Image (tube, rainbow, N blue to C red):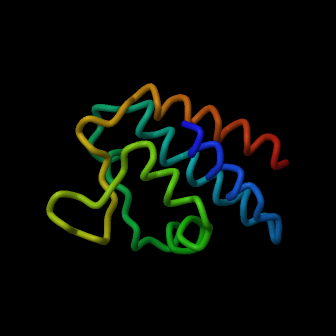
Amino acid sequence: AAKIDEYISKVAGYRAGGDGGKCLKVLTLLVGNAADNPSEEKFKQINTETKTYKNKVKPFLGAKNILMAVGFGIPENGDKSHLALKEDADIELLKSTKAKLEKAMAKYG
């Protein structure tokens, strides 16, 4: 969890053009959807080929680390165009990270 705080701080450090805020917003959505809907398959996958992911998540140091820290990773089939939530992902960690991301977003302004 300490690492997650560090990663969130890194992302929040991007001030130019509000990029960090946009990244935090997308991360909050991705982590939040997985936390709030743990049985929904569609929220257990993140397509890393989308324009949103490529522009608002991928370029920022710490962003992908947050997703990995809460339980997303390369799927077992090795498909590198997606991140998949591991079967044993900690839902409480997802929920607490969502709250931290929301707090960071509010602070970001």
Determine the residue positioned at 61% across, 66% down.
Answer: 61
* Residue furthest front as drawn: 2
Total label count? Answer: 0
Residue at 64% x, 41% y: name it: 101
Whether residue 65 sits left or right of residue 45 in the image: it is right
Choose between 27 and 69: the one closer to the eye.
Answer: 69
Above/below status of 40 relative to 63: above
- Residue drawn at x 56%, y 59% is 63
Q: Nearer the viewer, residue 71 or 23?
A: 71
> Which quarter of the rendering shows the N terminus?
top right
Q: Position of residue 71 (x, y in %)?
A: 37, 44
- Indicate left or right for 84 with 109 as reference: left
Residue 31: x and y in percent read: 49, 43
Where on the picture, by quarter, is residue 97? top right
Image x and y of residue 30, in percent? 48, 48
Most extreme residue toward the left is 77
